[in-house]
Image: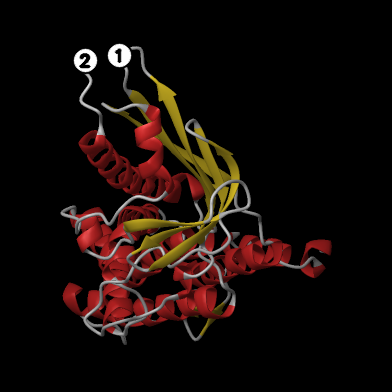
Amino acid sequence: MILFFAPFVNLFFFLLLCVVPERAPEQRQGGLSRNSQPTHFLPESAIGNAALSLLITVPAGYGMAWLGVQYLGNYGWGLFVAVPFTMGFVAAWIYELRRPQTMYGDVVVAVLSVSLLGIGLFAMAAEGLICLLMVMPLALPLAGFGGAVAHALRKGWRKEAPAMMGALLLFALGVQWIEHAVAARPRVYEVRTAIDVQAAPEVVWKQVVAFTEIPLPTELMFRAGIAYPIRAEMLRSGPGAERRCVFSTGSFVEPIQIWDAPRQLKFSVRSNPPPLEELSPFGHIEPPHLHGYLLSEGGQFLLTPLPQGGTRLEGTTWYQHGLWPAAYWHLWSDAVIHRIHLRVLRHIREEAEKQADGKEYSP
């Protein structure tokens, strides 16, 4: 019983009590089992039951998402894992209450519940299209899995449906509260990208410290709203100088840490602009994750002379993000930062090769 008084742990204690069947035999009252579930109010048709399921789970999912994001400030396991699984499970369970359904039907209803939640968040200007498209490959399979688990448990646990669903809702909310209380520090990730330039390091260096304006992007991800670099400006030179890398959403302010011309330029980052401009029919929207969740810690350009007379130019970014599961989200952020690197490095290469002195170069 001591688990009842432990903060957050008591939620899992409640979950255990809810799912363990009663040992005492059922007591009848008026010929009805106390554990029997009234289903006469449920629609007769499968479509009606699916609609009822969605009318219950989608608003509940919106409430849990709002609580996690707006009140607790979490973009983590509770929001991206526990909520989709719980919605899928509860949606399929309600769909099953009137009469047994197929596994396929349960999974479809489960996935539809989370899909409608995403549409609702988009329609109410709570989220933009880009982030919703990023989260769906994670959330939809989890919802489907929740529906499949509900289908597998439908025979042995049908009488405990309200308790099971209530326990899962407590579980989803509990995970979000735990994340808020623990406030784990995000780890730092590193992204490196390198290209070869047909120009001497001295020529390349001039473009590295302050490159000219880059033409508008052709990549779909940048045109859809992901922040992209435009130009770099240098205030003074040497250690302690300040570099500003202008992006489509604002400027990175980069104090210089190492100025080793023409070999290494290393800098920290004092100010980060938003990582993207959300794509929304409502114009400019600012979900909380646009500020303080994806942060660049620093960067570096490393120039290495090549035997043929050219330069190996390598760009590195160190960053962190407050999104979990980190193993999933850093795949997206790594890919975006790699494309940003390529946009900058290719422009530097193009400008440096234009200024090359014309000496023969063989890659």
Residue ID at (25%, 58%): 222
Q: Is residue 12 visible?
A: yes
Q: Residue 249 appears at what percent x and percent y?
A: 36, 68
Tell me which amino acid carries mark 1.
Answer: Gln
Q: Residue 308 appears at what percent x and percent y?
A: 30, 13
Which quarter of the rendered picture does the N terminus lie within?
Answer: bottom right
Tell me which amino acid carries mark 2.
Answer: Ser
What kind of element bears circle 2? loop
Q: Is residue 159 above or below residue 187?
A: below
Residue 132 marker = none
Residue position marked by numbered label 1 in the rendering: 308
Residue position marked by numbered label 2 in the rendering: 362
In the image, 58: left or right of 347?
A: right
| Total residue callouts | 2
Q: Which of the 4 image quadrants contains residue 362?
A: top left
Q: Are marks 2 and 1 in contact (CB under 8 Å)?
A: yes
Give whichever of discs 2 and 1 has the lower sequence position: 1
Q: Choose between 122 and 117: the one closer to the eye.
A: 122
Q: Residue 65 appears at what percent x and percent y?
A: 46, 74
Residue ID at (17%, 75%): 47
Q: What separation in Å lies between label 2 and label 1 (alpha carbons)?
A: 6 Å
In the image, 350: left or right of 139?
A: left
Q: Residue 330 appears at what percent x and percent y?
A: 44, 47
